[in-house]
Each structure stands twice: as structure tokens, then as C-alpha cells.
Image (spheres, rainbow, N blue to C red):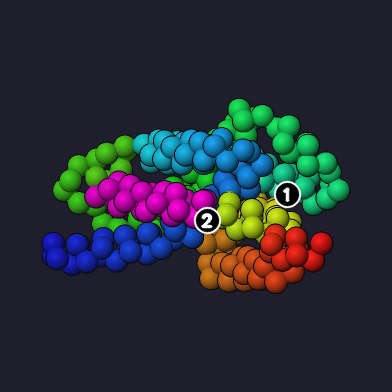
């Protein structure tokens, strides 16, 4: 019986680590875009602060998960914010670079914090939904849930943070080498905002969209297909900075 339980928990942990990796890629992309305009020193500092905040918010979210199940407004604010910054960029494509450079370091960190909160809620709610069906263990309770379930969610969250740590730096590098890719990146940010909006509309307190649909294969296939199309389209339509300089 114990071996069966161990295998069941192990399998869910593997799935959760993969899921958290995918969810954290969204977080890393937003983190990279928000910090890209800063000088290199402040950029790295902002990313590290964003990573620390992501860790704090995700761990905090695990402890207050029973409360978060009722707070759909956090996801709604996060969704609205991501869609807003995406549309703002796309509708003001000829805006001055000074507007972005004039944005203060503190303002950037505040924006990163807001995005991190929304992603933390999304990430932990997805993790809890995955482990909820697992049987309870004799480990006692941590943070209002079974100890073994808590540990599985914690390990998944740590795996997600590792993805953010490495992916954010990679995204910044890509966006620096291919500045014209930023439009596609902003489309991705807006699309991630739509994903958070879908989760908000599927929340039990709102229930405008079926929760089964949002968590099911059809929506996930649609979401990742659009993500892939935007990424590939942006990559092939963008120009490398060195190639652009050669043309000039």
C-alpha cells in the first residue's frame, strides 16, 4: 500500500514539475520584458528581485491556499494588467524610447511584483487542483493541507522558480539581440493575460466559463498552439541587431 502511495505521489510530482515549468515560462517572459529597458546592472538586480518575490509569493500562496480559492480578484487584476501593458505597447508602436527609459527602477520592480502575485496564484491553484485527488497520508497537516501534498506542491514551485531563473536571462538576451521581436513578445504577454482571464472566468465564484474546459485538453491545445505561432512568427519576421546594422 505504501509503495502504491509513493508511486502515485511520484507520478503526480513529475507531472507537476512539467506543468510548473510551462507556467513559469510565462512568468519569465513577462519578467524579461518588464526589466529589458533598464541598464544592465539594474536589469539583473530587477530580475533577481523578481525571482525572490516570485519565491515569496508562491510559498506564501501555498500557506494561504484555502483563502486563495475564494480570491478570484487577484487573477482578474493580473489578467487585466498583462492585457493592458500588451495593448499599450501594440497601440503606441511609434512611442519614444525615452518613455520606456524614463520609467523608474522602483516602478519596474513594483510592476514585476504585481505580475508575480498574479502568476503565483495561478501557479499554486493549478498545483493544488492537480494534487487534490491524491489520498491523504499520515504526515499531518502543513499550511492547512496534508503534509505530503504540501511537499509535492513546494517541490513543484521550486522547479518553476529554477525555470524562471534561467529563462528570464535567456529571454532578455534574445530580446536584446532581436529588438524587433519585442512586438511578438508583447503579443505573448497579452495572450498570457487572456489565459489568466480564462482562469478567472472559470473560478467557482464567477463560473462564466466551465472549469473543465479551461483545465481540459482543448483549451490547452489552443493556448499553446497560439503561443507557438506567435513565437515562430515573431522569430522569422524579426531581424538580428547585427544583421540590421549591416544593412544600414
Whether residue 153 appears in magenta in the rendering, the answer is yes
- Give the label on residue 136, or none: none
Disc with the residue nearer the chain's start (1 vs 2): 1
Q: Residues within 10 Å of mark 2 (few under 14, many from 20)?
A: some
- Compared across the picture, whether 103 is left or right of 196 comes to right
Q: Residues within 10 Å of mark 1 (few under 14, many from 20)?
A: many
Q: Where does label 1 land, which residue?
A: 86
- Compared across the picture, whether 205 is left or right of 103 comes to left
The residue sitting at the left extreme is: 2
Whether residue 89 appears in magenta in the rendering, the answer is no
Q: Where is residue 163 drawn, in percent x and y?
A: 44, 54
Relative depth, front residue between 103 and 74 = 103
The magenta span reads: 148-169
Q: Label 1, label 2: how many angstroms apart (C-alpha)?
A: 20 Å
Give SS at disc 1.
Answer: helix
Q: Main secondary structure of the magenta part?
A: helix
- Compared across the picture, whether 13 is left or right of 241 comes to left
**Figure label count:** 2
Instruction: Judge whether residue 204 can be spotted in this image.
Output: no
Relative depth, front residue between 134 and 225 = 225
Q: Which residue is at 31% across, 60% downward? A: 13
- Give the label on residue 170, or none: 2
Frontmost of labels 1 and 2 is 2
- Compared across the picture, whether 228 is left or right of 217 comes to right
Q: Which residue is at 73% across, 44% downward? A: 84
Q: Which residue is at 78% across, 37% downward? A: 98
Residue 6, above or below 139: below
Relative depth, front residue between 35 and 122 = 35
Q: Where is residue 63 drawn, in percent x and y?
A: 36, 36
Asked if the residue under mark 2 is in contact with the one under mark 1, i.e. CB atoms within 8 Å, the reply is no
Residue 57, above or below 32: above
Amino acid at each position: 500500500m505504501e509503495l502504491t502511495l509513493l508511486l502515485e505521489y511520484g507520478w503526480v510530482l513529475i507531472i507537476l514539475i512539467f506543468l510548473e515549468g510551462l507556467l513559469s515560462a510565462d512568468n519569465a517572459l513577462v519578467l524579461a520584458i518588464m526589466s529589458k529597458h533598464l541598464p544592465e546592472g539594474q536589469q539583473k538586480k530587477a530580475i533577481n528581485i523578481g525571482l525572490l518575490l516570485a519565491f515569496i509569493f508562491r510559498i506564501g500562496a501555498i500557506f494561504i491556499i484555502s483563502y486563495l480559492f475564494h480570491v478570484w480578484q487577484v487573477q482578474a487584476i493580473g489578467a487585466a494588467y498583462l492585457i493592458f501593458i500588451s495593448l499599450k505597447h501594440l497601440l503606441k508602436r511609434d512611442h519614444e524610447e525615452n518613455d520606456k527609459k524614463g520609467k523608474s527602477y522602483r516602478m519596474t520592480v513594483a510592476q514585476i511584483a504585481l505580475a508575480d502575485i498574479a502568476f503565483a496564484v495561478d501557479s499554486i491553484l493549478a498545483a493544488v487542483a492537480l494534487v487534490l485527488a491524491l489520498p491523504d497520508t499520515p504526515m499531518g497537516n502543513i499550511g492547512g493541507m496534508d503534509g505530503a501534498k504540501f511537499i509535492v506542491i513546494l517541490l513543484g514551485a521550486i522547479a518553476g522558480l529554477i525555470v524562471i531563473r534561467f529563462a528570464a536571462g535567456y529571454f532578455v538576451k534574445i530580446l536584446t539581440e532581436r529588438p524587433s521581436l519585442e512586438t511578438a513578445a508583447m503579443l505573448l504577454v497579452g495572450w498570457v493575460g487572456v489565459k489568466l482571464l480564462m482562469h478567472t472566468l472559470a473560478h467557482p465564484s464567477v463560473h462564466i466559463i466551465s472549469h473543465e474546459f479551461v483545465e481540459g485538453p482543448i483549451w490547452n491545445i489552443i493556448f499553446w498552439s497560439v503561443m507557438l505561432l506567435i513565437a515562430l512568427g515573431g522569430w522569422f519576421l524579426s531581424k538580428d541587431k547585427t544583421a540590421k546594422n549591416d544593412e544600414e
